[in-house]
Image (cartoon, rainbow, N blue to C red):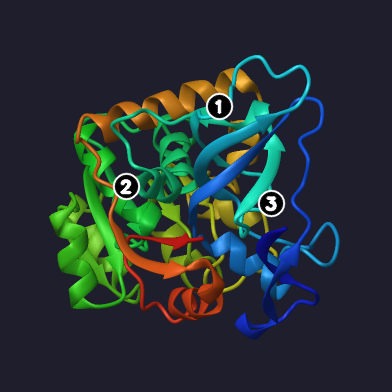
């Protein structure tokens, strides 16, 4: 048997139940892995509370982890038992062991720990596609990053600075502002109420070509108003709730703006894209250019407490669950 956190109905952290489940057998094209660490992400909350619809119930949430291959099914040529691997994407992570498509696993370099691997795959690959494809950040750009002291935010701050950009990080308190500045943010804004005026001051009125916004409903309009004409709003999360319906004429009125709601699943759907994104991430982490801050660790059975900490903004950087 395997131990797992399952939800039988949507709701608060209390709906997550630590229970026995049958150990799955890998089928054709699949691998069975023993988790060493599991990443905690806001998307886990969305599936738990029902913002994102569960494919079935009961459901094992969790979309990021690292571990060791135990067994492989037929037609798996790229993995063997004993391989160190990591992944982001498919549901089923909150378990001591899981089966996953071998096509979604990447080999974890020896110089990256299991904890770092679990903490960086979803968040780090998200940062990669946002910075390199959704809007290709160039030297000299000034950009806005919401939740700059969070897991994705800290990675974006470091990576964007490495690319030659000036980062304006939006945070909720001075402690988080200091953390964002220590990881590459040139400027920090506490709260979003003064964001537009601060962006105007910092840029001399030019405003910014891109805003990376994981907060959602509460920050949407201040993000839009921080953009230069032809600027891009990348709304990639809904920590404060989903953005209400948008009148497209708003984008015209504000300067022929671009608006996108990107997902990691789309940007890594092709195996070649997954390999390229992961390799780029492994390179900047392995070189020390980007440091993954694992600032909280919880036992997997205490996932409810981890969700509470995340939702009440008590966490910074990344959080991992240990089976």
Left or right placement of residue 311 versus residue 49 in this view: left
Farthest right residue in view:
56
- Please give the label number shown on residue 285: none
Q: Separation of disc 2 and disc 3 at Cα? A: 23 Å
| Percent position of residue 127, x then y | 41, 42
Query: Dot 2, crowdedness within 10 Å: few (<14), some or many (≥20)?
Result: many
Farthest front residue in view:
1
| Lower sequence index among marks 2 and 3 | 3
| Lower sequence index among marks 1 and 3 | 3
Residue at image position (76%, 62%) is 21
- Please give the label number shown on residue 91: 3
**Picture quadrant of residue 280:** top left
Q: Could you tell me which secondary element the residue under label 1 belongs to?
A: helix
| Lower sequence index among marks 2 and 1 | 2
The one of 243 and 161 positioned closer to us in this rendering: 161
Q: Which residue is mark 2?
A: 155
Residue at image position (61%, 60%) is 94
- Please give the label number shown on residue 274: 1
Residue at image position (20%, 68%) is 177
Left or right placement of residue 40 versus residue 111 in this view: right
Q: Could you tell me which secondary element the residue under label 3 belongs to?
A: loop
């Amino acid at each position: 048997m395997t131990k797992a956190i399952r939800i039988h109905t949507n709701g608060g952290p209390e709906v997550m139940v630590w229970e026995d489940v049958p150990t799955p057998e890998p089928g054709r094209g699949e691998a069975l892995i023993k988790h060493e660490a599991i990443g905690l992400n806001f998307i886990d909350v969305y599936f738990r509370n029902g913002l994102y619809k569960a494919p079935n119930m009961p459901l094992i949430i969790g979309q990021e982890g690292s571990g060791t291959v135990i067994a492989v099914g037929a037609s798996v040529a790229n993995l063997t038992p004993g391989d160190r691997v990591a992944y982001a994407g498919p549901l089923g992570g909150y378990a001591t062991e899981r089966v996953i498509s071998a096509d979604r696993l990447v080999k974890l370099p020896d110089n990256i720990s299991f904890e770092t691997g679990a903490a960086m795959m979803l968040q780090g690959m998200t940062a990669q596609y946002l910075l390199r494809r959704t809007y290709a950040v160039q030297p000299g750009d000034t950009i806005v990053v919401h939740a700059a002291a969070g897991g994705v935010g800290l990675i974006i701050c470091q990576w964007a600075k490495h690319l030659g950009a000036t980062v304006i990080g939006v945070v909720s308190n001075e402690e988080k502002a200091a953390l964002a500045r220590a990881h590459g943010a040139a400027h920090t804004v506490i709260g979003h109420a003064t964001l537009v005026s601060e962006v105007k001051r910092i840029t001399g009125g030019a405003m910014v070509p891109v805003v990376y916004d994981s907060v959602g409903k509460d920050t949407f309009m201040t993000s839009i108003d921080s953009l230069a004409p032809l600027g891009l709003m990348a709304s990639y999360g809904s920590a404060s709730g989903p953005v209400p319906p948008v009148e497209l004429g708003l984008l015209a009125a504000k300067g022929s703006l671009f608006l996108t709601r990107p997902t990691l699943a789309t940007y890594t759907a092709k195996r070649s894209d997954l390999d390229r994104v992961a390799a780029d991430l492994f390179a900047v982490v392995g070189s020390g250019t980007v440091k993954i801050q694992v600032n909280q660790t919880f036992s997997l059975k205490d996932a409810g407490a981890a969700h509470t900490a995340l939702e009440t903004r008590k966490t910074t950087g990344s959080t991992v669950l240990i089976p």
